[in-house]
Image (tube, grey):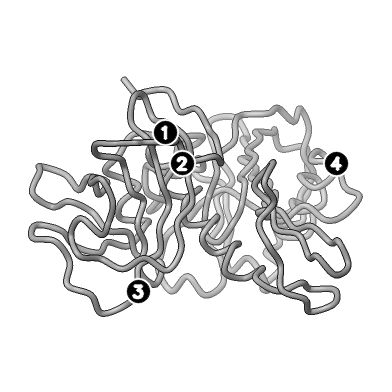
């Protein structure tokens, strides 16, 4: 059973003992490879293994374990039994909470690096003491870790599901439709618009399915199901290369099990 995560941005005082360090080098996460499956790096501090950090952020507690995000300087000698792993590969080996924490850590590190200077006046920003944010002392503009909402829609027609292959995937993998929410849109209107734009069909009975943080780079996937209501499938050729209804017993190649699209299809 997954442990509970309690988020916080204030590091504990007088901490001792090991902590979970979600530690990244160029987008890859440091993992312990001595177990049956890759595990999050655990140590009192990366310096315990002679590692130099470029930035560190407290995340909160996972059960009784304190959690930190850290970025390492490149070309350092990793601890014995450890390796750098692509985050997508890591997500399939840990529970949902640790997967979410891994993505949270990467997004906070990227946000902190990308917002060192104010986007309005160019002044150097500083961390706020009462929340996870960076403020420009010159113009007072404050930035927070960004989250981009993306809808996902799985359309059914009897026993069949409408699945699509994106342009540029370069393989035969099919998935549910997806698209970014635009300013001023509701989630429901985004579902309808994206469906019309990408495959040209109408839908009805839209129902919320669930959500999933997806840190590639900073998305929140918000998934819905709907029923086919009419129209001919016409892939737009820009986002979607091919789309069709597939019977539940004759499905094409599908996304990995870690994705919410696969959970909907299952």
Residue at 74% in and 31% down: 206
Q: Quadrant of the N terminus?
A: top left
Tell me the residue at 83%/56% (across/down): 182
Image quadrant assignment for residue 56: bottom left
- The secondary element bearing badge 3 is classed as loop
How many residues crowd mark 3 within 10 Å: few (<14), some (14–19), many (20+)? some
Q: Dot 4, how many residues are within 10 Å of its Cα: few (below 14), some (14-19), or many (20+)?
A: few
Q: Residue 207 at what x, y percent from top left? A: 70, 27
Query: What residue is rendered at 78% in x and 32% in y?
Result: 204
Q: Earlier in the sequence, mark 4 or mark 3?
A: 3
- Between marks 3 and 1, how big is the CA–CA gap? 27 Å
Which residue is labeled 3 in the image? Answer: 73
Q: Of label 3 and label 2, which has the lower sequence position?
A: 3
Q: Using the numbered discs, state the Cα–Cα distance from disc 3 to disc 2 in whole angstroms.
A: 24 Å
Which numbered disc covers residue 97? 1
Q: Residue at x 62, y 46 (%)?
A: 220
Quarter of the figure with the C terminus: top left
Q: Is residue 21 left or right of residue 106?
A: left
The first of marks 2 and 4 along the sequence is 2
Q: Secondary structure at mark 4?
A: loop
| Residue corresponding to mark 2 | 100
Which numbered circle lies on residue 184? none
């Amino acid at each position: 059973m997954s442990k509970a995560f309690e988020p916080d941005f204030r590091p504990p005082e007088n901490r001792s003992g090991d902590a979970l360090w979600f530690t990244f080098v160029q987008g890859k996460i440091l993992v312990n490879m001595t177990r049956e499956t890759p595990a999050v790096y655990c140590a009192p501090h990366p310096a315990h293994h002679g590692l130099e950090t470029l930035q560190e952020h407290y995340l909160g507690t996972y059960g009784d374990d304190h959690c930190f995000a850290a970025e390492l300087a490149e070309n350092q000698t990793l601890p014995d039994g450890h390796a750098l792993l692509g985050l997508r590969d890591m997500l399939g080996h840990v529970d949902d909470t640790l997967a979410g924490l891994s993505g949270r850590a990467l997004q906070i590190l990227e946000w902190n690096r990308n917002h060192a200077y104010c986007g309005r006046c160019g002044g150097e920003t500083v961390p706020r003491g009462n929340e996870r944010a960076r403020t420009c002392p010159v113009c007072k503009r404050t930035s927070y870790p960004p989250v981009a909402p993306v809808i996902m829609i799985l359309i059914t027609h009897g026993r069949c599901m409408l699945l699509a292959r994106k342009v540029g995937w370069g393989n035969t993998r099919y998935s549910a439709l997806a698209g970014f929410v635009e300013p001023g849109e509701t989630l429901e209107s985004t579902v309808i618009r994206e469906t019309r734009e990408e495959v040209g069909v109408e839908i009805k009975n839209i129902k919320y399915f669930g959500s999933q943080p997806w840190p590639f780079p900073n998305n929140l996937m918000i998934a819905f199901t709907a029923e086919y209501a009419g129209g001919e499938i016409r892939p737009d050729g820009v986002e979607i290369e091919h789309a069709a209804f597939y019977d539940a017993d004759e499905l094409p190649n599908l996304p990995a099990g870690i994705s919410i699209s696969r959970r909907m299809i299952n």
